[in-house]
Amino acid sequence: MIAGNRYLTSFGFATVIAAGFAGAAHAQTAASVDRSATLRYLYPVPPAAYDPPFAKNQFQELAFTLPVYDTLVQLDYTGKINPGLATSWEVSDDKKTVTFKLRPGVKFSDGTDVDAAAVVKSLTRTKTHPESKLAGQLKSFESFEAKDPLTVVMRLNVADVNVLYTLTSNTGMIVSSKAIDGGVNLAEMPVGSGPYKLVSSGPQGANYERNDNYFNKEQNQFAKVSITPILDSNARVNAMLTGQGDVGLFLLDQAFPQIKQMVASGKFQMHSVIQPNNSPLWLNTKIKPLDNPKVRQALSLAIDRDLISQGLQFGECKPAAQPFPPGIVGYDETLVPRKDVARAKQLLQEAGVGPFTIDALVNVAEPYASIGTALKDQLQAIGVTLNVIPAPVAGIRPQFRAGNHGAMLQALSAPSPDPASLIDVVFLTPDNPGGVTPEFEKAVAEAKTKPLGSPEREAAYKAISKMAYDDPRQIYVCWSPAVLVARKEITGLDKTAYINAVTIPDVRSYGFVKAGN
C-alpha cells in the first residue's frame, strides 16, 4: 500500500512565531542509538556540485548538500516549517517584511560565526549572482539586511506567503562568508554549518563525518555517512542484499517485485509515499509547432496513462494531467486525464499541423527510459514521432535549458510540499523555456497573497491547475511514489522531510538502533 501525503497548511503568516528547535520525532531513545555507526546510503546518481546557487540539477544534488548546509527554517516530514538557524520569525502586518532571530553560537565548519552578515551575504549571492540557477526562486525578496549580529530583516516586493517554504531548500542554504570572500571552490569543498562535514567526493560517491559541534544531536546520529551512486536499480537491490548498503532509494521499475520480496523476508523495511514528483514530458514551447496550444493538447490526449501505470509501474502510479498531486493544495479531482486519439487528430488538423518530429531528451535511468519508449509508441498514433535522445541524469536539464530540443522526459520535483514552490520550479524556471502567459503569471502572483490554509488559497491554486490542464506546457503522465528500502535496524524512514517534496530523503532523521534494543 502506498502511503498518502500529510501536509500541514495551518501556518498563520501574519503572526509571530517563536520556538525552540522542534526536532523530528524519533522512535528510538538516545540510549538505543548507536552514534558510532556509519550510514551507507545508496543513491541513483553521482554527486555533482556542492555550491547551492550553481547546482546544475537543484534536486538531484540536494541529497549531497543537505548534510553540509543549514537553512534558517527547516521542513519536517509533515510539511511543517520548524526553526533551523533561526529560532523565531515575525511577519509584518502587510506581509512584506520578515524578521528572523538567529540561533546564537552556531559556527560554520571553517570556525567562523553564522551571524546575520553571513546570512545576508549568502542569500544576496544566491539572488543576484548572474550565474545563479536559483535566483528566480528568490524573486519575491527585495532585500536582505543584518539589523544586528543575530537579526536578519527580509523585505519582499510582493506579499508572498510561500517565502518560508522557499528558504527550506537549496535556495535558502547558508554558505560561509569567509569561504565566499576567500574564493574557496565551494563546488568541491563546501563550507556550511550542517550536521555533517564533507570529507571526500567523486564519481564513486561522497563521504561525510559528523559535525560534533552541531546544535541538534538528533540530526547527526551517525559518526559517518556515505552516499554511494548506483545507477542501475537491480544493482542497487543486489548491493542491499549483500550488505553494502543500509538504505536505498528506488522508483517503480523492474526491481520493485524483488523489493517486495526483500520486505517479505523480514530483514528489510520499505517506506513509500506519493509525492509532488512526476515524470512529465517537458515541452519547449519556443519550438514550432509546440508553441501552439492545440498541438500540446493533442499530445496530452494521445497518451494512455493507465496503460503506462499498469504496464510499467505495477499499477502504483496514479495517472496525472495537472501539476498538483493528491494531498497538495490546488489538486482538483475533477481534472482527470483523458485519452482521445480522434480528438487529438482533430486538434492537429485545426492547428494546420501535419506529421512532425519532436527531439526529446530522455533520462537514461529507469523508469524514464521505458516511459519514453511507451510515449513514443503512443504518439505515433497521431502522426507525431518522438525522437528519443538518451541523456545522463546529471546533464539532461542543462541540455534542455540550452533550448535546442523540443522536449525532455525527466522527474518533476519541488523544493517543498507547497503549491507555490511547485509552480515556481515548474513554470518559472529555465525548465519551461517558453515561459507562461501574462494571465498565468498574474494568477500565480495573486495566489501567493492568499493566507495559508484559507479557502481562497485553495480556490486560487485550483484555478491555476485548471489553466495548466487546459494549456499544458508539460505532458503529465502519472504520480509515482518514491520507495525507501532499509535494513530493519534503521529508524526514521517515516520521518524524513524531503521525501514528501522531492525524491530525496534527508538523512538527518535517520538513526541506527543498537543490537539488542
Image (cartoon, rainbow, N blue to C red):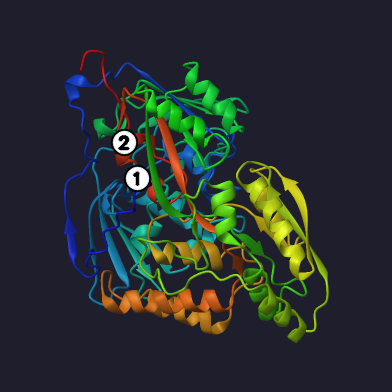
x and y, in percent, of residue 73 in the image: 31, 51
* Left or right, residue 331 beside residue 73: right
- Pick the residue in front: 447 or 277: 277
Above or below, 117 against 145 in this view is above
Q: Which residue lies furthest to the top in this view?
A: 516
* Left or right, residue 275 beside residue 213: right
Above or below, 74 against 237 in this view is below
Q: Name the residue under label 1.
A: 497
- Pick the residue in front: 135 or 483: 483
Mark 1 or mark 2, earlier in chain: 1
Above or below, 275 against 228 in this view is below
Residue 190 appearing in the image = no
Q: Mark 2 points at which residue?
A: 509
* Left or right, residue 388 beside residue 485: right
Quadrant containing the N terminus in the rendered view: top left
Inspect the image, locate mark 1, and give the three-letter code of the amino acid beneath it.
Ala
Above or below, 348 against 215 in this view is below
Q: Is mark 1 on a helix, strand or loop?
A: loop
Tag 1 near tag 2, CB within 8 Å? yes
Q: What element carries label 2?
A: helix
x and y, in percent, of residue 487 in the image: 37, 24
Badge 1: residue crowd in 10 Å (few <14, some 14–19, many ≥20): many
